[in-house]
Amino acid sequence: MTQHTIIATAALFGMLSVIFGAFGAHALKKKLTTEQLHSFEIGVKYQMYHALALLAIGLGFNTMLPASIYWCFTIGIVLFSFSIYGLVLSDARGKKIKLFGPITPLGGLLLVIGWFLLLLKML
């Protein structure tokens, strides 16, 4: 995985987390319950945390980062955060898409694996 790809991915996810955070705070604030808004914010926070992790990795590595770490974080963000967005927004419309429910923990598991692989790389 190239440094530019890692940084570009981090920038994309960071930008989207700011957009989604603003969307949640302003456009969805009156349409979501407190619990739904909290869940949405968790998706945004985890997306930003991992965008920043990717950015730090992209800026800090002089050697090639194992592609598995990049893919665990990238796919983990999509599965975790985006499934939360889908669950919350579909629930707010009264048509909760339950298929997203089992996807969220898979994304979380990939994020954990990404951190574990990074730990192994540093050891």
Image (cartoon, rainbow, N blue to C red):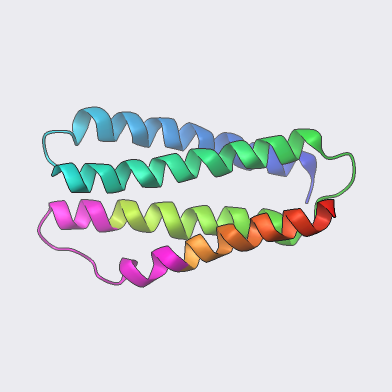
Magenta span main SS: helix
Residue 112, position in %: x, y? Answer: 59, 60
Number of numbered discs on residues = 0
Please tell me which residue is depicted at 30% across the width and 56% down the height of the picture: 86
Q: Quadrant of residue 24?
A: top left
Q: Is residue 86 left or right of residue 53?
A: left
| Of the pair 118 and 27, the residue shown nearer to us | 118
Q: Which one is in front, 90 or 49?
A: 49
Indicate the quadrant containing the C terminus: top left, top right, bottom left or bottom right: bottom right
Residue located at (69% from left, 60% from top):
116
Up the image or down, 42 lies above or below 15; here it is below
Q: Which x, y percent locates residue 44?
A: 40, 41
- Span shown in magenta: 87-105
Name the residue at 79% across, 46% down: 2
Q: Is residue 77 magenta?
A: no
- Residue 102 seen: yes
Horizontal relation, residue 25 to residue 118: left or right = left
Residue 53, percent from left and from top: 63, 41
Q: Residue furthest front?
A: 123
Q: Residue at x 13, y 63 (%)?
A: 95
Q: Is residue 120 left or right of residue 87?
A: right
The part of the image, by quadrant, that contains residue 50 is: top right
- Would residue 71 be visible to someone looking at this image? no
Residue 57 placement (x, y as % from top left): 73, 41
